[in-house]
């Protein structure tokens, strides 16, 4: 009789298995959360570098921006005279290389269309590419003289490699935008 009761009394025998499954699931979720947080920290640093580069480019164009209301003409448009042609308005903007400015700020190196930052063991930690730079200023004869004088927007594609030597997995792709506006105070 004792043998039968020993084999029939199996209540609570699966508790250890459930605990192991729960801990494994918790560990996997925590691992992905940590990787995502790492990617966001890298993306924030790249966005800050892009913001600094774009602000530098926007403030370097200070002499090409004018208040439409005060000056009577719009920023970055200048009348050019040619001996053979009639007078025409041309746009004058100092276009900076945002990618090289970001490389200098971050400390990355350019290779194959991407800028890349390596870990101490030589593997890539992240790479990024400036996909679009838009320079915008008031049009000639602005409809809103109090509108924007000069705006620079940069779009960046960031690829963050997975940690823990998961080289066979595709990288985390993030798209980041940074914008700077320059307006004269007077």
Image: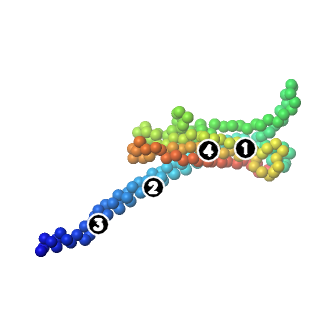
Residue drawn at point x = 75 percent, y = 44 percent: 137
**Residue 97, percent across and down?**
63, 37
* Mark 4 or 2, nearer chain start: 2
The one nearer the camera, 112 or 184, is: 112
Residue labelled with disc 2: 33
> Distance between the Cα atoms at labels 3 and 2?
27 Å
> Distance between the Cα atoms at labels 4 and 1?
14 Å
**Residue 51, percent across and down?**
62, 47
Q: For the residue carrying disc 3, how many other residues have a C-alpha within 10 Å: few (<14), some (14-19), or many (20+)?
A: few
Under circle 2, the secondary element is helix
Under circle 1, the secondary element is strand
> Distance between the Cα atoms at labels 1 and 3?
64 Å
Residue labelled with disc 3: 15
Task: Kindly identify which numbered label has been placed on residue 155.
Answer: 4
**Residue 104, percent across and down?**
57, 39
* Mark 4 or 1, nearer chain start: 1
Q: Quadrant of residue 73?
A: top right
The one nearer the camera, 141 or 7, is: 7
Q: Is the residue under label 2 in contact with that under label 3 (CB below 8 Å)?
A: no
Q: Nearer the viewer, mark 4 or mark 3?
A: 3
Q: Nearer the viewer, mark 1 or mark 3?
A: 3
Q: Nearer the viewer, mark 3 or mark 2?
A: 3
Residue labelled with disc 1: 136
């Amino acid at each position: 009789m004792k043998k039968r009761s020993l084999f029939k009394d199996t209540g609570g025998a699966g508790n250890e298995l459930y605990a192991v499954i729960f801990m494994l699931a918790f560990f996997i979720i925590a691992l992905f959360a940590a990787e995502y947080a790492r990617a966001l920290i890298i993306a924030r640093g790249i966005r800050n570098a892009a913001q600094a580069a774009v602000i530098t480019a926007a403030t370097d164009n200070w002499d090409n921006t004018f208040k439409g209301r005060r000056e009577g003409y719009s920023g970055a448009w200048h009348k050019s005279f040619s001996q053979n042609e009639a007078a025409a308005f041309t746009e004058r903007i100092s276009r900076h290389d945002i990618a090289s400015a970001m490389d200098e700020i971050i400390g990355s190196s350019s290779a194959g269309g991407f800028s890349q930052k390596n870990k101490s063991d030589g593997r890539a930690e992240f790479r990024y590419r400036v996909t679009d730079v838009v320079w915008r200023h008031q049009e000639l004869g602005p409809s809103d003289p109090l509108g924007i004088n000069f705006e620079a927007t940069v779009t960046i594609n960031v690829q963050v490699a997975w940690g823990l030597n998961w080289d066979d997995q595709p990288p985390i792709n993030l798209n980041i935008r940074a914008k700077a506006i320059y307006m004269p105070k007077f």
